[in-house]
Image: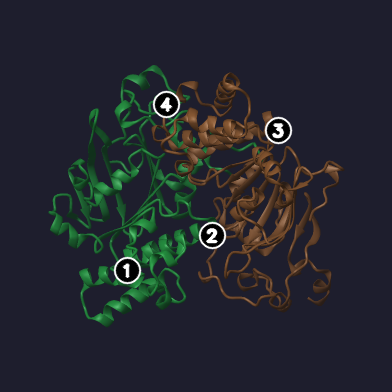
Chain colours: A brown, B green
Amino acid sequence: MMDKSSQGSIPPLLEVQRLSLSFRNQENAIDDVSFKLTAGRTLGLVGASGAGKSSIARAILRLLEPDAGNILFDGNNVLEMDRDQLKETRRRIQIVFQEPSASLSPRRTVAQTLLEPLRHFAIGDRQSRQDTIRRTLHTVGLDPDVLQRYPHQFSSGQQQRIAIARALVTRPDLVIADEAVSALDVSIQAQILKLIQSLQKEHGITFLFISHDLAVIRQIADEVAVMYRGQLLEYSSADSFFSGPAHPYSKALLSFAGFNTPPPLPVIQAPARHASACIYAARCSEKMPVCERFRSENYKIKNKEGPLCVKCHLYDEKNADET
Amino acid sequence: MSTAALSVKDLSVWIETTAGRRRVVDNISFSIKAGEATGLVGESGCGKTMTAFAILGMLPAAGATIETTSIEINGRDISRLSTAQMRSVLGRDVAMVFQQPGTALDPVFTIGQQIIEVHRRHAGGGKNNNRQAMLDSLTQVGFDQPGKIAAAYPHELSGGMRQLAMIAMATVCNPAVLIADEPTTALDSRTRALILQQIKRLQADNGTAILLVSHDLSVIRQSCQNVMVMYCGRLLEKTDCQSLFAHARHPYSAGLISCIPQISAKMGSGIKAIPGQVPAPSALPPGCHFAPRCGRAVPQCESSVPALEPGTEQGVACFRPL
């Protein structure tokens, strides 16, 4: 969807091509979504609840089976892998969930929780596994004396550190953080964001960082992708995005974030729409007649910080002529 | 004091733990005028929710002890009412919006039935009257099709819509005081904006006095005039929102502000975390409870307790304020 000349010929670590996925009797949870993620970089995937962010995360790990499209990880299609290849891919892609108290087993000690992935993927021997665990704990800022304790004996911030340690213990190339800081207090959130920043810097881990909070995305992401009801509406570098997003939905999202006083808001229920219309037309403040009839192409535009890719009729030059 | 809609004097809360009796709210006093909102901010485990529950008289049932000089709503002391008397106060004079609307709403009744029940209990009147009040209340919080929402069960609504329904239920009898405990936590930014818009509407249109409990200062800044910073059961700073953000005087307040991720800050530049974590009520340090995490602490902070000036509207409990 986006060309980045600065990235040159380095093949992306993850490439999602025209991915679609639907649940029974519903509009597409993921609707023709494409993006690339270069090794060592962080993509911030942002959108309201129900936009399909988590479905993408799950599809990448093949926890959900997409209807169409390709997911290339390190050049290989995840959707065509056999069992052994998929297992190895799942070692290399780890995920951290929103609620640490729900994603850690209450009946396992920290040592058991961290040992499990090493056993499952047959990494190392008995002694080296202990070393790996201790090293990983150190990376996330926990002392080795926590090993024999259970999740309920930790605060939510420490629990999330354990969940991150569990993801890191297999030495993954890509970590998907699915709303990993959303359930935390701002003060704990700041501590976890600092931890993720140091992992980016010191270990070169690639992140797919999913969040509904643009201010958090700003701290973490190199690139930003905005989702709305299953579709990717805008995709660009973080600097171009935050210097002036192009899509009306992105502008609205940005106005709700941070310290800005929210503008008066319209109706609450998501309105019905014509199947081929722009997905955001019913709520859009800059709607044109064409938006009710056709879905927009992706247009490449530029602002002062760099290129943006946006799915909106406003940026079609034909329409610019008409208005 | 007659101008204050809510006035709390010398409130302390004690809980029984396996290690003995612990004070989780430590002698706090404050008041909120009609039409104003005050934010109560602090990390998890600082006693914010305990304070809210204590005001509503919900704690004795949970095994906690309350000591207070008075808790007045429009001049009437509610701290010594019986459970039966309290029942006629809750929902009419003071109402609460909880953090988890999913668990606070009853899953087997429709939204409409639950709101009508509140109105019938306090305002009485005929069937049509109650139903109309319920529909008005849903309309006021922004639903364009209140009849549809009224017929829905809680599980049929999204989290944000449930929270708005919860606000409609809390405000159907137009209470003088509304206590909102983390009403926007775990909601996305658009829904959060909708909820905060309602908080402001209630102040402006109904003259409701609001106590907004949150760990997130950016939420408080968007909806409150005044703010109280709480740590380990004590109020560390009381001031108006503008002054706090322009010049936070307590190092803890400044720490909480610097935790908020900023859209304007470039990647990687903005985050400053407060080191360490909130101590358990059984392991409170002597002196100022924040001293072990404070970059400005001096030996005095570890031995004696800095106090807020009693009776003042603004102040800071710190020996070395910023």
Which of the 4 quarters of the picture holds residue B239?
top left
Closer to viewer: mark 2 or mark 3: 3
Q: Is residue B22 above or below residue B116?
A: above
Q: Are marks 4 and 3 in contact (CB under 8 Å)?
A: no
Q: Relative to B19, is A315 on the left or the right?
A: right
Pick whichever, B222 or A129, lies toward us.
Answer: A129
Which amino acid type is shown beneath numbered disc 2?
Arg
Same chain assignment for discs 4 and 3: no
- Name the one closer to the observer, A160 or B203: A160
Alpha carbon distance from label 1 to label 2: 27 Å
Residue A252 position in % (x across, y down): 61, 61
Q: Find disc 3 in the rendering and name its residue.
A: A204
**Cα distance between the residues tagged 4 and 3:** 41 Å
CA–CA distance in space, label 4 to label 2 = 39 Å
What separation in Å lies between label 4 and label 1 (alpha carbons)?
Answer: 54 Å
Nearer to us in this view, A100 or B148: A100
Picture disc at residue B109: 1
Sequence-earlier tag: 4 or 2: 2
Which kind of residue does numbered mark 1 sit on? Phe
Of labels 4 and 1, earlier in sequence is: 1
- Chain name for mark 1: B
Number of the label disc, if any, that sits on residue B320: 4
Q: Identify the subunit bearing mark 3.
A: A
Residue under label 2: B190
